[in-house]
Amino acid sequence: MKIANALTIAGSDSGGGAGIQADLKTFSALGVYGASVITALTAQNTREVRAIHPVPIEFVATQIDTVSEDIDIDAVKIGMLGTAEIIGAVADGLERNSLDKVILDPVMIAKSGDALLQDDAISALRDRLIPKAMVVTPNLPEAGVLLDTSAPSTEDEMAEAAEAIYKLGAANVLVKGGHLTGDTNTDILYDGNGFYRFKHKKINTTNTHGTGCTLSSAIAALVAKGVSLSEATATATDYIHTAIAGADSLNVGKGHGPVHHFHALWSQI
């Protein structure tokens, strides 16, 4: 049996709940081998991002080339990039190494509220990476920033935002509805022809650090295994729902704790 390989291109979370660490945990939990390209180092915990240290542009490019020359990559998840220069290096690296099946999570703000993407990088994200994406996965505030409008506040507005982001060049758009009020969380996938809605009952917990990273990397893992995007999204939203449901069984930090990536495995130990 061939094990699928997925690559995450993202920032490192020293607290372990999001970024590269969350992506690799998710890949492993879903039976996929994970490789990584680190774009930034962060000094953070469950309460704050204290410092961000971008990785030199040349080293980002070298990581992409070195991994791609040796490992057959079946899907790529892209997370925190930080600057326009890093976005350019990643876009060039994807082209140079013929990396496709790109799941793009436009990471802009940490759960703590700290900014993770410079303002001048938004246009680079729109122009260089969205057109390369198999799917873009913004949450509501990120959708608003990408479209230079207010964040969607209803399901109808989410659908409109998905269509508008699709017109920027993405093959598919998944707008995540976790910021909506109400008892139900709805995520909306648009493929250019129609909408798919994925609904789950909201879970009352503050331990939701890394939800966006985990969902996008779960989609990447399943796509790497050959699952269709709509099916991968359905399974990934189920996975993050149960990971959130298991989050309170962890005892990590005093702020927004991480979701439980290994809830299914650890329950058997």
Image (cartoon, rainbow, N blue to C red):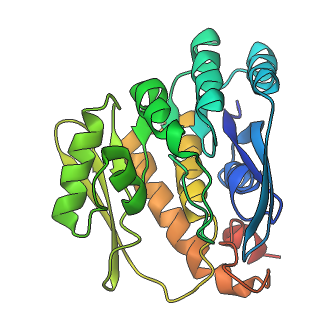
Front-most of 254 and 207?
Answer: 254
Image position of 84 with respect to 261: above or below: above
Image position of 192 with respect to 174: above or below: above
* Residue 202 drawn at (x, y percent): 42, 82
Would you say residue 71 is visible in this rendering?
no
Horizontal side, residue 223 vs residue 110: left or right: left
Horizontal side, residue 87 vs residue 147: left or right: right
Image position of 92 with respect to 263: above or below: above
Front-most of 196 and 210?
Answer: 210
Image quarter of residue 44 = bottom right
Q: Residue furthest bottom?
A: 204
Q: How many marks?
A: 0
At a point 79% along the width and 80% down the height, the residue shown is 252
Q: In the picture, which quadrant includes the C terminus?
A: bottom right
At a point 60% along the width and 33% down the height, the residue shown is 76
Front-most of 161 and 28?
Answer: 161
Image quarter of residue 151 = bottom left
